[in-house]
Image (spheres, rainbow, N blue to C red):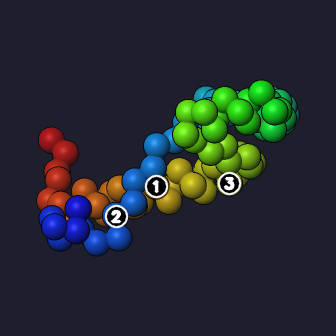
Amino acid sequence: MVESGINGFVATLLTGVVAPAGTPGPIVGKLNSVINETLKSPDMKDLVVRFGSEARIGSPQEFGTFLAGETQKWANIAKQAGVALD
């Protein structure tokens, strides 16, 4: 990417769980709690590491902030690269 004139390029692969807009907060909270507890289990930790990955445990708000940042980052990269949507 540097050779293409784009400095500071970092790309990550992510997997996340999302729910439809308007999903009640208690349901989102319960899903988040169960998913986080599962990710903390020794079996799941081992599985994630075996796939060469890292689990980031957090809140729905943190994930939303991360997604918003990624959206902005990739929009800027597309703009720098002259990519246009038809």
- Note whether residue 55 is visible: yes
- Is residue 36 left or right of 66 when viewed as pictured? right
On the image, which quarter does residue 82 sit in?
bottom left
> In the visual, does 70 lie left or right of 42?
left
Q: Residue at x 51, y 55 (%)?
A: 68
Q: Amino acid at mark 3?
A: Glu
Instruction: Assign a secondary structure to mark 2.
Output: loop
The residue nearer to you, when weighing 54 against 11, is 54
User: How dense is the environment of label 1, judged by Cα within 10 Å: few (below 14), some, or many (20 and up)?
Assistant: some
Q: Which comes before the other along the chain, label 2 or label 3? A: 2
Looking at the rendered image, the quarter that the C terminus falls into is top left
Mark 2 near mark 3, Cβ–Cβ under 8 Å?
no
Evaluate if marks 1 and 2 touch, with contact meaning CB atoms under 8 Å apart: no
Question: Residue 35 occupies which quadrant of the picture?
Answer: top right
Judged from the image, the secondary structure of the residue bearing numbered disc 3 is: helix
The residue under label 2 is 9
Q: Which residue is mark 1?
A: 70
At mark 1, the secondary structure is helix
Give the residue displayed 60% in from the left and 56% down from the top.
65
- For the point 66% across and 43% down, the residue is 55
Picture disc at residue 62: 3
Residue mark closest to the camera, 2 vs 3: 2
Query: Which badge, 3 or 1, is on the more N-terminal residue?
Result: 3
Measured in 3D between alpha carbons, the distance from the residue under mark 1 to the one under mark 2, in whole angstroms, is 12 Å
* Quadrant position of the N terminus in the picture: bottom left
Q: Quadrant of residue 80?
A: bottom left
Does the image show residue 32? no
Q: What is the distance, in whole Å, between disc 2 and disc 3 at their CAs? A: 22 Å
Question: Foreground: 43 or 62?
Answer: 43
